[in-house]
Image (tube, coloured by chain):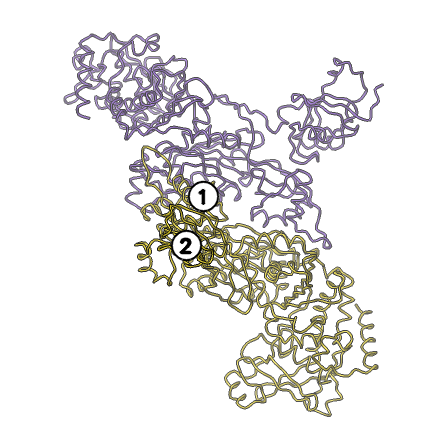
Chain colours: A purple, B yellow
Amino acid sequence: MYEAREALVVFTPSGRRGRFPVGTPVLEAARALGVDIDSVCGGRGLCGRCQVDLCEGHFAKHGVASWPDHLTAKSDTERAWETRRGPLRAGRRLSCSTQLLGDAVIDVPAMSQVYRQVVRKRAEVLDIALDPIVRLYYVAVPPPDMNVPASDLRRLKEALTREWSLDGLETDIRVIQQLQTALRQGDWGVTVAVHDDRRLIGVWPGFQSQVYGMAVDVGSTTIAAHLCHLQTGEVVASAGRMNPQIRYGEDLMSRVSYLMMNPGGEVAMTRSVREAINALTLALADEAGVAVETILEATVVGNPIMQSLVFGIDPVELGGAPFALATDEAIDGLWATEMDLVIHPNARVYGLPCIAGHVGADTSGMILSETPYLGEELMLLVDVGTNAEIVLGNRHRLLACSSPTGPAFEGAQISGGQRAAAGAIERVRIDPLTLEPRYRVIGCEQWSDEPGFAEAVAPHGVTGICGSGIIEVVAELYLAGIITPEGVVQGGLAARSERIVADGRTFSYVLHRDDSRTLAITQNDIRAIQLAKAALYAGIRLLMEQFGTQRVDHIRLAGAFGAHIDVKYAMILGLIPDCDLEHVTSAGNAAGTGARIALLSRKARREIEEVVRRVEKVETATEPRFQQHFVDAMAIPHRHDLFPQLSAHVSLPAITEETDNAVRRGRRRRRQRV
Amino acid sequence: MYEAREALVVFTPSGRRGRFPVGTPVLEAARALGVDIDSVCGGRGLCGRCQVDLCEGHFAKHGVASWPDHLTAKSDTERAWETRRGPLRAGRRLSCSTQLLGDAVIDVPAMSQVYRQVVRKRAEVLDIALDPIVRLYYVAVPPPDMNVPASDLRRLKEALTREWSLDGLETDIRVIQQLQTALRQGDWGVTVAVHDDRRLIGVWPGFQSQVYGMAVDVGSTTIAAHLCHLQTGEVVASAGRMNPQIRYGEDLMSRVSYLMMNPGGEVAMTRSVREAINALTLALADEAGVAVETILEATVVGNPIMQSLVFGIDPVELGGAPFALATDEAIDGLWATEMDLVIHPNARVYGLPCIAGHVGADTSGMILSETPYLGEELMLLVDVGTNAEIVLGNRHRLLACSSPTGPAFEGAQISGGQRAAAGAIERVRIDPLTLEPRYRVIGCEQWSDEPGFAEAVAPHGVTGICGSGIIEVVAELYLAGIITPEGVVQGGLAARSERIVADGRTFSYVLHRDDSRTLAITQNDIRAIQLAKAALYAGIRLLMEQFGTQRVDHIRLAGAFGAHIDVKYAMILGLIPDCDLEHVTSAGNAAGTGARIALLSRKARREIEEVVRRVEKVETATEPRFQQHFVDAMAIPHRHDLFPQLSAHVSLPAITEETDNAVRRGRRRRRQRV
């Protein structure tokens, strides 16, 4: 039998090892070796965060004799924990309440690590090294002694130093105000929240293990938020709601115009967006069964105007040249009370940095989420809204610009356009022989030419066409030869199909007609899409030119636009440059993901702050080459040699030399007008 | 003629010297040599802070040849400044606008030094090395350039680094909110306020040179405040007003009792004291013609209960053993908005640290003002209010306690007692032969036996007796032999004087009688003073005993009590220990002075924080020796051998051995009761 006053312990997966006196708690041994094991309660068997697995037999391989007992038997503390929280998995122990009796190999499962990797559950899989800025610590504070006068705060801090090696903490005034009651209600045991390892921002009587954070993405139209558990990284609830500022103007520029006409109006606009965030917070907390007082951190992304308004900065300077930002730094450590948020009053708010007057914190969020700055491959990020934010680069260099696409891609400024909602046409195919369309409507499984479509669509009818539908119909009109590369509806085809109808001096294509409405794609609609796509493509070209590249390796399309459009059609229309279609993917709500990463990782905050400083800002408004690219991009791409990768997927209409020349003439004329 | 490409310059009083190219501005040379010259405008000739005197001829002593011109002639900038601000004193120049032409000796007057000594104007003379935590800097910021996008804040910070070597500044959100307007209104010139060399807390368009601070002393009865110019240290206005909390109870303990009966009542009490501070602030600002928005810093002292209430901390724990403070640290850097103060919203508030449950930030202020911790001599500091705060020590050791004197010294609990106000008797003399009194009344130049007294006193009459009067009358009663050392009014003397009258089973002394009132000193009044002085003296004895000393070198009496009592009578009654009377002096409002020092000097804050940690707190409530000393101190001192220094000034009544024995018997009886 192996007798030892000391036991050898090896921790996996870190491989750290050491010898400790028999009787040493496993957690203490881990701490001494610098092994990452979580604990909130400080080894009191309350939090259950320090679970480990005993791996027996490993030592035999290394020639160590067998031994009867490696660890003490399950303790009363562990049994009490199991009574409260359910049985521990077989072989699993609370490392704080288990002592070493002999040599042992102990595995620390991912769930017990503080700095573990978190794999996100949804479409976008992403690893974040969890390192939240707020952590909880349970601590027992000696009661006061009249003969050794030391204030309650001093004794708390001394206990935090003793138990948690936390030194020199600063303290929020509200913690001081609440401390005495908390200590006495908790019978001299309290849980404190420490911000960034240096400031006490919360105190609760007794043991408290839940602390949450909010990641908020403030869009011009929609405000979206995720409620996350800060210790696990888990998203416990997500929701979105309309941005109430829409009452001040549908798009950003009309809101800034409103402010120019109504100085001081930013106060009401700030209030309304904060109220919307609060309503969203209450809904999320309610859904997840979380008390708002346990939300101790929030991060915010938004375009420059929304980010300004959220933080109470008048965005009026962003309404005109030279588009000066008040700040291009992160807003760091702002008190929630300063923003009248309903979360814990000492919660801090972090706003990701804006990049330039037209390139906001939402773009910073997208960069943080997509990390183009880490790889060698050239990545193009595009977030299309009223403006398109475009980022191009790799680990060596990053460029960003904003391009004024206008709202056509969102269905606005289109005669039958509408937001993506039930009843909107979202997919379109046109038979190049008959010129007849078929389409799909949101809220309806069937295509329009499939059985049961009429019944399925009946509840709401066909109400309009949304962004992805517009792009598809224009591309299909082109593929069917109904419009020329210049975008002109061929009136001559009216003889072949009654879908083509005269509309004053131009022609329209009737996509849908029923008793209540006729939905036609007009020449103006096609022009609006051409203008939007030309602006987007010109911005991309400008960045590619400044980067000195003719190709990109990956294209990531962010936001609702990226999630819904068929990238093939985007490429047919020439929204994006030629690229292997498999490398053109949706990035989802990349800005919101960036906010969530910043919420869960301090390192990520420093990273994006540093990356943003390196981004080269390209101003489309003053760059003469942008106008050039814009004019060049009006036509629909028709030269196969320019889109070799797209041509592998799509048969473009045969273009005669005559057509080609007509397009060139058109370009020249337009260039002269500009 | 002495020709040189370089000029030698010597600055006095620092003695720093160096050679500089001819044409170097004097301010630049001073900066290069590390000479302390103030400037807010950064050498633009706006602020007038950098004035220097040219001292010609000094060099001749050192054998340097004569020269025609040392400095450039008065510049247009200087003339413009004189037009705005009045002529410069003869020989005085703005060092920023004056260049070296040849060797020169330049004197930097005290007013131009940043870290100058400030000599206070009032009774208490005190040197403070001025080092305010808030400083102003004028800076010119380049306008924004669309092609080099850098936010307004970034360009401001870069300018501050360039012009003022300020690096890595943090920024208050309100500064970001106001920055764009300020820059544009100021035509790209702004003045910023920097807190503690590390955070931007204020911004104003153009040049701004005034920044103020408030030092607030929150007493139980009175709130006093000084408004100070932070750059000069000058007190521009001072005022006091009643503490409105008096509605919750006359003294502290009744206010805490109110809170115990009315949980949550501290919210209203906090609000009322903050409102009083705001009213005082507005009055001071109005008096001095200062905008409240230019008040950027405030310091607060108060006893533990008042300090707690000002900072929104429920003081209820201070109402009973073990008298635990929420915090004994300084409250540092609290936003004025957190306290709803009317000063600049980004102003920060500093609360001096409390020492123990009964020894507050007012005592810290007194220690900072009197600096017992700097010298070798043993200093006793006494601040008498409802409690007496007592500090004893020197640079080696400091002890502090609080002793429950009750309010008798303030005229409360005395039959004819009143606050010090017109009509109150403040000085008393009693003829030991006739037993007749004469006295002086506040608001009246004459003594009561002088011609014109009746006319002078007529407007208000004789309304009562205040604290200093009570002490004098009891001491004089003793010196006249009317009361025994035990404090008993000798009824037998009623036969000699009709001033001595029976009052139930005891006797009173009629001090004043007119048509409207009779003012008599009753046996109970004398007992109340005996209890109060015994408590004070017992506290002092306890500290002396713990320090291991039988004597003190200096006694400083703080507050209104210290300012008004005649120390001789205090010593006769035995309030304070024997000490050379010349070394017993008034410290004025030492707590308020401490608040002012903390306002003007960062170093002083660190100093008092460090000193307070070293103070040994002595708890009178649990110290058995305190009871002993208390009983011993009830009698009036009558043993000349115990008070040799006092005896040099006063003839104490002859005490017979019989009286002495009676006193001893009395003490024994009282000790048994305790």
Horizontally, is A661 left or right of A546 in the view? left
Q: Amino acid at mark 1?
A: Ser
Is disc 2 in the same subunit as disc 1? Answer: yes
**Sequence-wise first label, 2 or 1:** 2
- Label disc, if present, on residue B165 of the rendered structure: 1
Between A248 and B424, the residue placed more toward the observer is B424
| In this view, the mark in front (2 or 1) | 2
Between B58 and A162, the residue placed more toward the observer is B58
- Assess disc 1: are there few (<14), some (14-19) or many (≥20) residues with their C-alpha within 10 Å of its C-alpha: few
Q: Position of residue A399 (x, y in %)?
A: 38, 25
Compared to B641, does A102 lie above or below? Answer: above
Q: Position of residue B249 (x, y in %)?
A: 59, 65
- Assess disc 2: are there few (<14), some (14-19) or many (≥20) residues with their C-alpha within 10 Å of its C-alpha: few
- Chain to which mark 1 belongs: B
- Label disc, if present, on residue A290 of the rendered structure: none
For the residue labelled by badge 1, is the local secondary structure a helix, a strand or a loop? loop
> Which residue is depicted at the point 28% across and 14% down?
A476
Q: Position of residue A208 (x, y in %)?
A: 62, 38
Hey, which quadrant is residue B536 in on the image? bottom right
Horizontally, is B45 left or right of A239 in the view? left
Compared to A490, does A259 lie above or below? Answer: below
